[in-house]
Image (cartoon, rainbow, N blue to C red):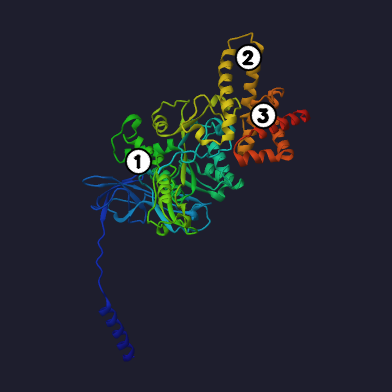
Amino acid sequence: MSDLVKQIAADLQKQIEAYAPKVEAQDVGSVLEAGDGIARVSGLAGVQASELVQFENGEYGIAFNLEASNVGVIVMGEYASISEGSTVRGTGLIASVPVGDALVGRVVNALGLPLDGKGPINATSRRPIERIAPGVVYRQDVDTPLQTGLKVIDSMIPIGRGQRELIIGDRQTGKTAVAIDTIINQKGKNCFCIYVAVGQKKAAIARLVATLEKYGAMEYTTVVVASAEDPAALQYIVPYAGCAMGEEFMETGRDALIVYDDLSKHAWAYRQVSLLLRRPPGREAYPGDVFYLHSRLLERAVRLSIDYVIVKKGAEATKANAVNGRLYKGPMAKHDAEHDFKAMANNADLEMKRTPASGGSLTALPIIETLLGDVSAYIPTNVISITDGQIYLENDLFNAGIRPALNVGISVSRVGGDAQTKAMKQVAGRLKLEMAQFRELAAFALFGSDLDKATQRQLERGQRLQEVLKQGQYIPMSVEQQVTSIFAVTNGFSDKVAVAKIREWETAMLRYLETSYGHLLKDVAAKKQISGETDKALREAIAAFNTTYQG
């Protein structure tokens, strides 16, 4: 027994001698007051703006207000158990979220934690939720279309990759439907999608996820959620978290689309947080920096410039392999690389290559809800001024059965035809002209009783154009189908079809062309234009269909 005691004593002695005390400095504070998702903390002298802090109960918060005597913290979780005197510790970490391919197909919260019951997310990297948007030097022109699959948008209000296109309208006018159709249409187009749900009911989010799964869109989509039940703090940070996830794709040379649904509720959450932290209120009780709230978010939507290197033939396009050690960046990258390449004596053994992590894009579709069509309200006005175009949806059009309920007259895309294929430009120009004439004549006809035959024909053509631009939900169309439909109607092939039968005629016509003249549609898709030969062949094919159509 004595030997056992001696052995234990010897082991303890060794552990005592091996003990090396560690001194670790921590920034510690205590809660002065807490409630409504907000905590005021004394101490934390070294805390940084947007730094994560941890409360005694294990919940995290973000340092929001840095004042002389205290720090205002927004709590990102359960705040009921946080009480006066509770300990708060700084983490030294800026608020960040996991990013990368591991999030594709998942439903996560504002912190990147899974909500779909599919297990943990094995992301290998993280990104801060806030960052400075790329400067002008690092951007390139928006000249590549991002197809929505909706004829009325792709033809007249086109969206380009890297654009910020606002979807605006009253409640229940189909704003989310337009965004979801756009996501569904990205299938097979190598474009990753992020849908950010702000302040929505959980039931509505569940239905949306089910819809995306039904149409195979969750294979390339991440849904980021801060529901109406979540604290205002999470609703405030969730768009920035979703944007950080999208930037990961963009900065690895890929294309991404992000939908913010919606920024009206985001502004409400920010107002709530700001008022609780006693920030000075301004117009409609919003703090004075509410414009900056959305501008610093939407400015992060961009199409990055393409970088080039000169390497030996067959070598990987990296700066490490560059024969002159140079990476060409910015708007003059291609010009400078070509100049240096031509000047090299041994350029027969070299080649100029694009680096794979460049040229990516992040396209933003923010959604704003209006009240009774009032676009001059504070938040709509702010967001309109930041975006590159607006898609206006109207109650009257929606109730009249025109869906998407898009008011073409006041909707605009500042990118315009640059974000269209040549084939779409060829048919869209005439479409815009005839629709503008139709709107003018329709307004005039309300006061006229006796219209000449030419005016009547033009009105009837406009009615058929309006009808063909209608489109059911979750039925996006390929570019070649859109082009063919618009081509047929603008060239008068539907003039003898009853207005009520136009959509039926369109469906039958496209089915006929796909089965009997599929090569024509493939030609439009491949060449992205309607050549003279294809134009002639399309006219003959549609005329042949009309002889068989018995609608």
Numbered label attached to residue 455 = 2
Query: Residue at (62%, 40%) from the top-left corner?
Result: 525
Tag 1 residue: 273
Give the label, 3 or 1, closer to the camera. Answer: 3
Residue type at mark 3? Ala
How far from the left and from the top, in percent, is residue 272?
A: 36, 38
| Mark 1 and mark 2: Cα distance apart in space | 58 Å
Residue in the foreground of this view, choosing between 340 and 459: 340
Which quarter of the rendering shows the C terminus? top right
From this view, report whether residue 514 is shown above or below residue 78: above
Quadrant occupied by the N terminus = bottom left
Q: Label 2 is placed on what type of residue? A: Thr
Q: Earlier in the sequence, mark 3 or mark 2?
A: 2
Dot 3 surroundings within 10 Å: few (below 14), some, or many (20 or more)?
some
Query: At which x and y percent is residue 226?
Result: 45, 45
Between marks 3 and 2, how big is the CA–CA gap? 20 Å
Image quadrant in which you'd find residue 38: top left
